[in-house]
Amino acid sequence: MVSGKCRRTASVAALACCALAAALGLLPGRPASAAGVAGAVGFEDVARRAKTLAGKSWEKPQARGPKELSALTYEQYRDISFKADRYLWRGARLPFEIAFFHTGFNFDNPVRINEVDSEGVHPVRFSPDDFDYGANKLDPQKLRDAGFAGFRVHHAVNTPKVKDEVLVFLGASYFRAVGKNQRYGSAARGLTVDTAESTGEEYPRFTEFWIERPAPGDTELVIYALLDSRSAAGAYRFVLHPGTETAMNVKMRLYFRESVHKLGIAPMSSMYFFGENQGSQRADYRPEVHDSDGLSVHAGSGEWIWRPFVNPKRLLVTSFSTTDPRGFGVMQRDRAFSSYQDVGGRYELRPSVWVTPRGKWGSGRVELVQIPLPDETNDNIVAYWVPAKAPDAKQTLELQYRVAWQKDRVTQPPLAWVTQSRRGAGYVRAPDRGFAFMVDFEGPVFKTLPPEAKVTGAFTVDGNAQLTESIAFPNEATGGWRVSLRLRRIDEKKPVELRGVLKNGDETISETWSYVLPPE
């Protein structure tokens, strides 16, 4: 289960409320019935539903149930739990079990959920009798049509004797997973539309799910989902593989009602409050607070890029252009408890989330949105792939990818990568208005370098700064190398972009460190 603070996902207009539940550790309920479909359901069946839906005018979802549900506080909503003896497949000796979330709090749009087996499709019926409402004073008779807000999947990953919570679908198109010895952190989303645009963000949502009943020996779970939004409708197929690294193979097909200005594919949401490169602005016993500390991009050219996160004072949107990306993710590289000192949050156990595209995605960019954050209860980081050509109305788009929640085995560059980016004042003996960075690299390449190797740092700044020092030297404490940088900014109202790699002669031996110093 997740640690217990409310997370209201921030995007620009307000990043829908997803992280929230994921970081919740709630349990909750079953859905309203769907139109039955004869026979088993497959991806093409859901795609036909999506295509039909896209041919109709969009209907804004309406909240259901009594007002008492939407008036619940976070703690009150968290007190509602789905009864353990009512889990789907409980007692059937199957490798997976399903629990459900009740509507309420910020999750007031019910979703339909179906079980699919060899006999066909069976809508999972909502009943308030399946829930324990805790200390809440709610009349069950008024909740008969409240419906489900989402569901969670349980599977044994830490010990064979206990089925742990490994996946949650709750809120808009958000889903979040954990692997062995992980805590909930960064989330994935089905789709984003116009994130960080002045016109406001559109929030696609999953409206119906079909969950295939597994066989006793199955190690994967298949889930289909129908997505709907003002601009598009879509079909999704998720194949869940829980384990040390919990992964989802995703197939999606979108049908567009209208043209979209900016489409976000395989989006991820995370939280960065403060860290080694940006200390807390208030007294806090914790050295760092974040679900992830940077964006990693494996470009189509083969270059690896690392962009440390910041908590800016104003909205900050940057991107990395490439063709046929090999992967990208929001990563939690710092795994030391001493870096966080948070016994409840356990940020060192929160997973990195890595996306691996399948097939050719063409030209486009990995876009990173960073939003000012006053505390750690919200998500303020969003990353996704933006196709170079935005889809037009009546167009169809199909893509596949794999998304993995990683901790012990992570996707990273083969030679050397950045382990920390420490920022401070730029003065040596006398105060000035400059900046200093200490960038540490580690990796297997340093174990194979010959004694005569001439490692240098090739670092640059953009036109809004002057680089006054760039020195690379061995870090005896780690076995890696450190680069010391000092610079002065020319216009404090504008950002500064820094970039650099380690070289052995003419050979690049590290990923690219790419940093944006936000404007004051």
Image (spheres, rainbow, N blue to C red):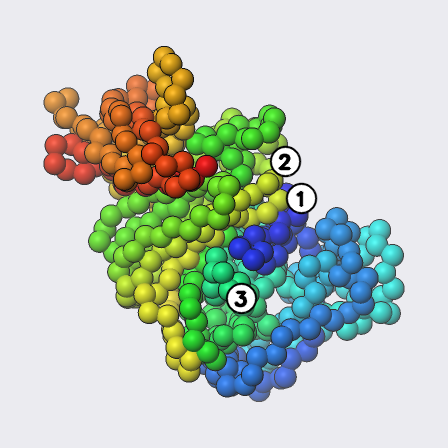
| Residue under label 2 | 344
Label number found at residue 71: none
Q: Circle 3 sits in a helix, a strand or a loop, which is it?
A: loop
| Residue under label 3 | 202
Between 8 and 90, which is closer to the camera in this rendering? Answer: 8
Q: Is residue 330 above or below residue 290?
A: below
Q: CA distance from mark 2 to mark 3?
A: 34 Å
Q: Circle 2 sits in a helix, a strand or a loop, which is it?
A: loop
**Would you say 50 lies left or right of 420 here?**
right
Q: Residues within 10 Å of mark 2 (few under 14, many from 20)?
A: few
What type is the residue that disc 2 sits on?
A: Gly
Give yes or no for contact between labels 1 and 2 (Cβ–Cβ under 8 Å): yes
Disc tally is 3
Where residue 328 appears, x then y in whole percent? Answer: 36, 52
Where residue 185 appears, x then y in whole percent? Answer: 54, 46
Q: Earlier in the sequence, mark 3 or mark 1?
A: 1
Q: Circle 1 sits in a helix, a strand or a loop, which is it?
A: loop
Q: CA distance from mark 3 to mark 1?
A: 28 Å
* Residue at x-position 30% and y-position 50%: 298
Give yes or no for contact between labels 3 and 1 (Cβ–Cβ under 8 Å): no
Where residue 172 appears, x then y in whole percent? Answer: 58, 64
What type is the residue that disc 3 sits on?
A: Glu
Where residue 473 appears, x then y in whole percent? Answer: 25, 22
Q: Quadrant of residue 259?
A: bottom left
Regarding residue 271, the answer to whether it shows in the image is no
Q: CA distance from mark 1 to mark 2?
A: 8 Å
Give yes or no for contact between labels 2 and 3 (Cβ–Cβ under 8 Å): no
| Residue under label 1 | 4
Between 31 and 256, which is closer to the camera in this rendering? Answer: 256
Closer mark to the observer between disc 2 and disc 3: 3
Closer mark to the observer between disc 3 and disc 1: 3
Q: Residues within 10 Å of mark 3 (few under 14, many from 20)?
A: some
